[in-house]
């Protein structure tokens, strides 16, 4: 007898087969992929169909896949000078801050931006992940689901603010977390980790001002546990013998 996760995947395939681009079961959870054109129809069925009953939208998040599968350090092997520390930036987020017109060369990646919804069915005690890729990397547009789940309102605003994903049909799509007049989207992988501007208080002008960021971007190397034989410490008996002075010969 199939478990609940496998059963849900089969029900989704039978009911929404033609509307799904992909369906995956991993780590005990089901993920479906839907095109923007079919999103609203699929979302309505997921909410209203009794065998699904996903009446709660837990979260909507953005994803930027531009550097997916890339890294800047090699930590599996060491040399006489240590690890390769990735001092030459290769991924876009570690590039120098842009102080001019804030235009940066964006690496190209097929289907760069995606919006991911996390759904919950209290009735059936099931969870579902729905992923929608934006068809255009330069202007990522995805339909808003606020008309189906009202909780999507601030979630979609957050994804718009941090990733620049436009949710078509959203009643009030504006920034939520960044400052007024903020330029760019800080969670995009081509946005510098140190940012583009910093805020300081100018004692001469007696006000807060913005200026180009003065922090030099750098690559951090994570802690790595290396495999290999480690020299065994001396036993307690050996340590004690080493500390005690040699016994004097008897007279």
Image (cartoon, grey):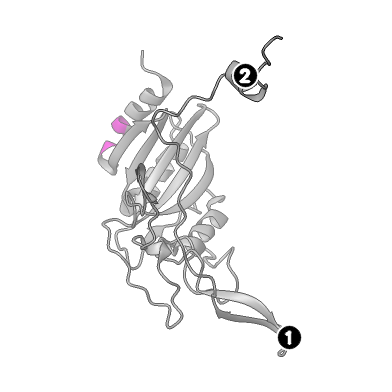
Q: Is residue 212 above or below residue 38?
A: below
In this picture, which residue range is highlighted in magenta? 13-17
Instruction: Give coordinates of residue 212: x percent, y percent.
Output: 53, 79
Q: At 54% across and 43% down in the image, what residue appears?
A: 58
Residue name at image x 31 percent, y 50 percent: 35
Can residue 169 be seen in the rendering of this structure? Answer: no
On the rendered image, what quadrant is the N terminus found in? top left
Mark before the other along the chain sequence, 2 or 1: 1
The residue that mark 1 highlights is 203
Q: Between marks 2 and 1, how big is the CA–CA gap?
A: 67 Å
Could you tell me residue 24's position as x and y percent? 32, 34
The reply to whether residue 62 is in sight is yes
Report crowding for label 1: few under 14, some 14 to 19, many 20 or more residues within 10 A (C-alpha): few
Quadrant assignment, res 98: bottom left
Q: Residue at x 36, y 24 (%)?
A: 6
Q: Nearer the viewer, residue 220 or 44?
A: 220
In depth, the one of 192 and 178 nearer the eye is 192
């Amino acid at each position: 007898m199939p478990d609940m996760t496998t059963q849900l995947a089969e029900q989704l395939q039978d009911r929404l087969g033609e509307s799904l681009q992909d369906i995956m079961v991993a780590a005990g959870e089901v993920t479906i992929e839907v095109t923007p054109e079919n999103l609203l129809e699929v979302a309505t069925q997921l909410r209203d169909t009794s065998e699904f009953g996903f009446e709660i939208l837990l979260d909507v998040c953005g994803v930027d896949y531009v550097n997916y599968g890339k890294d800047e350090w090699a930590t599996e092997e060491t040399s006489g000078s240590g690890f390769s520390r990735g001092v030459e930036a290769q991924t876009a987020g570690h590039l120098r801050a842009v102080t001019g017109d804030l235009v940066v060369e964006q690496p190209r990646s097929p289907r760069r931006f995606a919006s991911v919804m996390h759904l919950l069915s209290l009735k059936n005690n099931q969870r579902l992940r729905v992923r929608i890729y934006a068809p255009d990397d330069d202007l990522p547009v995805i339909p808003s689901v606020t008309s189906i789940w009202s909780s999507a309102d601030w979630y979609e605003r957050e994804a718009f603010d941090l990733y620049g994903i436009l949710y078509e049909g959203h009643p009030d799509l504006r920034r939520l977390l960044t400052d007024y007049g903020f330029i760019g989207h800080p969670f995009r992988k081509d946005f510098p980790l140190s940012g583009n501007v910093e805020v300081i208080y100018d004692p001469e002008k007696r006000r807060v001002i913005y200026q180009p960021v003065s922090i030099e971007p750098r690559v951090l190397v994570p802690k790595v546990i290396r495999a290999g034989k480690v020299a065994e410490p001396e036993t307690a008996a050996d340590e004690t013998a080493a500390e005690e002075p040699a016994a004097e010969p008897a007279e």
